[in-house]
Amino acid sequence: MTLMPSDFVSANKEKYTAIRRFFHQIPEPGWEEYLTTWHIYQHLKKLDAPFTFTIGKDLLNSDSRLGLPSVQLLLAAHRRLEQTEADAGFIEKIAGGHTGLMVTLESGRPGVNSLFRFDIDGLPVREADSESHIPVKAGFQSTHPGYMHACGHDGHITTGLALAEFIALNKDSLNGRIQLLFQPAEEGCRGAKAVADRGWLKDVDHFVSGHIGISQYPVGTVSARTCDMLATSKLDIRFSGRSSHAANNPQEGRNALLAAANCALGLHGISRHSDGGSRVNVGSLNAGSGRNIIADKAKMMVELRGENDEINAFMLDQANRVTEGSALMYGVEHELQLVGHALAASCDEPLAERMEAVLKDCPLVTEVVHQLPLKASEDASVLMDAVQKSGGQATYLMFCSPTCGGHHNPEFDFDESVLSITMDVMARSLLALNGS
Amino acid sequence: MTLMPSDFVSANKEKYTAIRRFFHQIPEPGWEEYLTTWHIYQHLKKLDAPFTFTIGKDLLNSDSRLGLPSVQLLLAAHRRLEQTEADAGFIEKIAGGHTGLMVTLESGRPGVNSLFRFDIDGLPVREADSESHIPVKAGFQSTHPGYMHACGHDGHITTGLALAEFIALNKDSLNGRIQLLFQPAEEGCRGAKAVADRGWLKDVDHFVSGHIGISQYPVGTVSARTCDMLATSKLDIRFSGRSSHAANNPQEGRNALLAAANCALGLHGISRHSDGGSRVNVGSLNAGSGRNIIADKAKMMVELRGENDEINAFMLDQANRVTEGSALMYGVEHELQLVGHALAASCDEPLAERMEAVLKDCPLVTEVVHQLPLKASEDASVLMDAVQKSGGQATYLMFCSPTCGGHHNPEFDFDESVLSITMDVMARSLLALNGS
Amino acid sequence: MTLMPSDFVSANKEKYTAIRRFFHQIPEPGWEEYLTTWHIYQHLKKLDAPFTFTIGKDLLNSDSRLGLPSVQLLLAAHRRLEQTEADAGFIEKIAGGHTGLMVTLESGRPGVNSLFRFDIDGLPVREADSESHIPVKAGFQSTHPGYMHACGHDGHITTGLALAEFIALNKDSLNGRIQLLFQPAEEGCRGAKAVADRGWLKDVDHFVSGHIGISQYPVGTVSARTCDMLATSKLDIRFSGRSSHAANNPQEGRNALLAAANCALGLHGISRHSDGGSRVNVGSLNAGSGRNIIADKAKMMVELRGENDEINAFMLDQANRVTEGSALMYGVEHELQLVGHALAASCDEPLAERMEAVLKDCPLVTEVVHQLPLKASEDASVLMDAVQKSGGQATYLMFCSPTCGGHHNPEFDFDESVLSITMDVMARSLLALNGS
Amino acid sequence: MTLMPSDFVSANKEKYTAIRRFFHQIPEPGWEEYLTTWHIYQHLKKLDAPFTFTIGKDLLNSDSRLGLPSVQLLLAAHRRLEQTEADAGFIEKIAGGHTGLMVTLESGRPGVNSLFRFDIDGLPVREADSESHIPVKAGFQSTHPGYMHACGHDGHITTGLALAEFIALNKDSLNGRIQLLFQPAEEGCRGAKAVADRGWLKDVDHFVSGHIGISQYPVGTVSARTCDMLATSKLDIRFSGRSSHAANNPQEGRNALLAAANCALGLHGISRHSDGGSRVNVGSLNAGSGRNIIADKAKMMVELRGENDEINAFMLDQANRVTEGSALMYGVEHELQLVGHALAASCDEPLAERMEAVLKDCPLVTEVVHQLPLKASEDASVLMDAVQKSGGQATYLMFCSPTCGGHHNPEFDFDESVLSITMDVMARSLLALNGS
């Protein structure tokens, strides 16, 4: 006999609110979620369910990880983990920036394979310290200075842990295979590729994920169809030239600063595409050292987007050309590194319809919107695409909530009451897909 | 017994003034001096001297001619020549843009080889038609609309013809070998290379040339040392891309206009050189056709300069890089064509001292300036360099004159009284170098 | 009793094919349609109908005409007209580039006001002279060298004249007011504003226009709803600086060429807009004169577009800023002139539905498409907007036809059998709107 | 009776070598020379001479100080000084970045006024720590991490202190007025203007300064005429725009990064000047924060130079225009701050000849070179100019020494034996100018 999602939520919402607040205090950016992965693991371990764990190096195709942080930052994360009770085996699996984990429940009964995905990383944002900011007022602000869960992934972790407990409680009445993916490094679209390239999505029939916030409707507004997910490429571009004294022998320099300046203007001048929207931004440019020295180094952080994958590919092709040409103009070396990548995936209609039916059944949901636009990029698109290419279906839900100050902002916060909805909806989805 | 230069000048100055006015009326730009060459030839033919003639194709290394005009313009020049009494043999030597000629007098007596050089081309400048412009007032303005002797080369031709007559009159008392080079296509530094590459400068002991005007001192001021002759490269740069409709499919275009715009800015941004001055100018840029079409063609006229040949070479090297890089940035083809070239040659001191002595002897010369700067480029530098490389000496004189409106200007004119000085000085130089 | 459109078409299609071929031979670009207006007038004059004529200066708000040609071109057009039998009164109304005319039929019976609009200008395109080009083969190619009806406006004129005859034949059974507008200078979006600003659209209840070609479906495919009409601004940008000699005193120049190059790159770098598509194109750039002169003049032909009027306004605002800033950077004067302008108007649904019903009734129409995209700009949008702002409704039909080589191309041609459809549909529309 | 310079040097060279090593260990950059000024003061205080002290705020025109460091850095310097035995009065005079001092000896006897100037600041360069670097080997490397005497000003301080002692020893046989200026903030050309604007140079008859190193001739080579001192302007340029999300609403951003990129290219494209050499360098550009945010801040460090003051003024005028125009293009605010400034002053011939005679008398000087080029900029030029404008004469000597690794380099070091020469020459100069 199955536990009702509503009853589970009523009984556990304080507990999971506390769990969310715990994770809010230990935000770690992508590939540095060492503590985060450890604590997720601890929670899951305690559950009474025959879960199989796939952790870090076993989960990821190591070479497919995009946008890795510096060795210094990884070492700092490593030291954080060493200060817990984590055993050597666990540490070894995480070491070198291999974060995230997946649990699998094989029910032993026939049925579909469903994968529920939750992203776990924080952001390099310094959390607001004003009293009006609820995490401050309620005493659960970030304890990791300069970092913050400013996009609600702490809520996503919480939802995943709650779903795991619900699975444990109902394990005897579930069919098929169920997987919960706690994905690292969503921010910057850096982590999904390493999961997909490891081959985990091949046998998935249903992929379900979602996001808290985004559309600033009241809590209770939910949609089963997220649209306008932009394809994107995140690039780090570096130019390397030769310094010389600006008065004594300027002609001997190879000016990396001017190459970067020319490249930045050229990137923003890439042609519009008549098949749909595109975006380009050189978000930062840092070049040169002394005032009287021809600059020999320059670095730019760039992102490109397209309303479809072809437009995004066009942007990348042009960006390569602009970069190469700028380097040649100034006689400098260049390096263009892909540090993030997402696709323009969309939800599969049959699965979206089933999810929409789930939403309509959920008493906490006050309004079901047919579709809601993301107007941004989401790493989940890479997973959705992999599932769809293997014949499975995918959907991405939107759990609306006001977000004081907007995503990625020091003031960001969501209304915690949305957690009851995420927990309820995910439990119902599980039953709809894998219930008996 | 030798005729005195002063007597020759007194007796002939009206005649040569008329000759100058004749040539002023038939200005032809570089490689189009068909009539000009013919009329020079006619004058020289009539002289009583055993001159050997080297005309057009015999004078030039055909492939070394820079900046040739269009076939249409050459055909028009050809037709001009056909309307004279020029015989088929002469026409054949000039055909296809092979203008200019040289006369050689072998005295049969031992002595040095001296070459006197006079440039003969006009400019694509429409002559002023105001009454205050002396050629208008005196009725000898250009009859070739859109073209003008706006740099005084009509005076140089005249000086050369007078020197030829002076040689004829004194042919029995001259020693060694004497050559008068009537060089085509000085403007844009396009013609000298074809003469030098043919090997004519190898045995020259003394090279003498000069210019009327430049420094706006009164007539009578002369210098035997012209300095600050800048090395230069004249370039035509073309970009060729692909057109497309600016609204329907801009992404399919390859934008030659933007490549040229980027290249123009890049060329002007070439680094200063600490060894001396340099110059760069994109003098014209023409690109595109329709407003709603991505431009597939662009052309730029460019010039580079350097205070020495190394700096000029540096500029050219950079210009190549900037052009290639700009083409690559925009995915277009490029062509960079050298259409003119001069060096930074300087006068040889021993010869300059001898010329200075000549100047001091000339009663028409009121002031001898030690040296005068050109601050521009002169095709003669290529000839001077060839002579100097073969062990000869070269000098370049400056015959000052006011120049109403400046060189290359519709109002340009020099004071005709300077012709007495050029004739006198060249005759005296001849005697100093090759007299008995 | 009313004549049936089908009968009218059957009886007159050869005649109107001949008329189309006549106008194809006398293409005149915008504001130069002197002969064109005259011949339209001649045709209309002969009809037995109480038409009121509004010609040239009476039709247009003179100051609102955009993108006027040079005085030389207007004089040439004037001389063309003087060689016809046009009387002084007619010539006076056209003089100075006031082309186009409108006829009005006041039925005297109550009813709505319907305006049918036909554009009349040709293009500065040199017509193909290959035998495969039907106008060549059939002997009706352009007799105005360098100009061509390369967008089908000859077919539009023809349709308008046929509709006028149909009106004359049915004048006693029509209601309300009917107007036929023969609009000048559609190309470049230059003419409609002058008509709208004169106030002619204020009382119009129904505005009907359309285009032959565009979507390359077979003849017989028609749509009553043209969508994706892009708002646009056409700009001529001029920079005026100061010339100086590139070697002697470059520092005294004010470089208009570099200002234009910088501006061109800046314009193409205007930010994307998240509310929809936009376009920018610097279609031509011409700057400078001599290679060794700092360029003192530059001119660019530019166009901007937006999927809605706000985006187009954003583009224009940015373009102004980029132009001003570029001028300031190089110390030159600038002028930014609006030479064309269209809006992003769309069809009114109620009228479009009525037109769609007409299409479905027409036996020559083989397929009615719900809507077809223009993906370009159309001067009619300015008229549609004026009608809509005054409370009327507007629609713009698409009469598909293959167009050998595409619009604005030397090979352009449409299939003449489409004229039966345009004539039939317009006659039916007239009856639907103003029939008794 | 006067002490002989040679005897003084022989007797004191070890002492002053130790003093140099002491100052080498406490390098402080411009306007932060709190300890440095204090220790100079301490040395001078102990001398038996009726010196008048002019310290910090009394020496400088406060508002004329260029390129002040941040308040944080000034506070750190203040705290360093507070940890010495400096009394409140001294500290008050230095506070707020008023470093440097001058001592004046009024002999009471008639004679000229001579001012000897020594610069005292170090550089923000991290000193090399290899054993081959002599200060490491000999144990006197910088104790101020990240800062270093990498331009030899520790040697200049030493020379000034030695001259002070020599004056004290000879005070009864000196005439006129003698001043020793220990000038702050020479690096970046920031300090001299504040001294000059205070009016100290008005009555100076002879200004003598010099530099160790520069020309890499052996120790013993000296010149009394330093030439090619370039005028310069050091600029900090800031752009301030408005950030926005690069995907959601890029059109609302005001892109400071692109303004800076455009400005950097524009600055390097400033026209050459036909009157002489110039330089421009954007040494650093830092803009933007996040990859997906339109950058709202940008900062550039720039320097301009000219072979004469007019050319430098031309460069500054153009740089202002380029900056303003770039800001306007991108709709951002700009700030252009002058943080350093030097002139193109040259040595006065009569004084240079007297100094040359001194050099020839000095037995330690092995070769006197007529003149040596600086090919860089020197803050002393501002002082020289002020002296010359008031009718005095100025000269700037070059004391050659090899400089392992070049000026401003972590490996920089000069050969300490040059100190004997600087001490000897300065003492002899004093006697030549103010001896009895």
Image (cartoon, coloured by chain):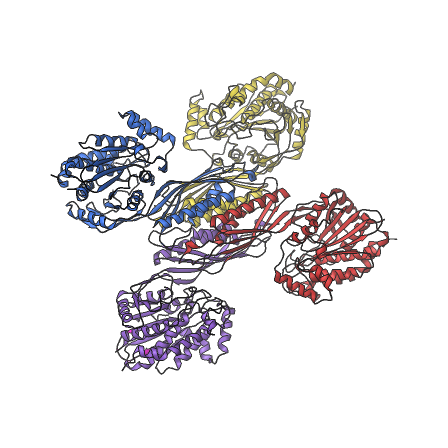
Chain colours: A purple, B yellow, C blue, D red
Asked whether residue D232 appears in the rendered view, the answer is: yes
Position of the N terminus of chain B, as image quadrant, is: top right
Position of the C terminus of chain B, as image quadrant, is: top right
Q: Tell me: D302 left or right of D179.
A: left
The image shows a total of numbered marks equal to 0
Which quadrant of the view contains residue C431?
A: top left
Q: Position of residue C373 (x, y in %)?
A: 28, 49
Q: Is residue A110 magenta?
A: yes
Q: Is residue D259 magenta?
A: no
Task: Establish if C324 lies above or below D132.
Answer: above
Q: Residue furthest top?
A: B11
Q: Position of residue C118 (x, y in %)?
A: 25, 39
What span is in magenta? A105-113
Q: Residue furthest left?
A: C1
Which quadrant of the view contains residue B238?
A: top left
Q: Nearer the viewer, residue B16 or B164?
A: B16
Asked whether residue D21 appears in the rendered view, the answer is: no
Q: Tell me: A219 left or right of D352.
A: left
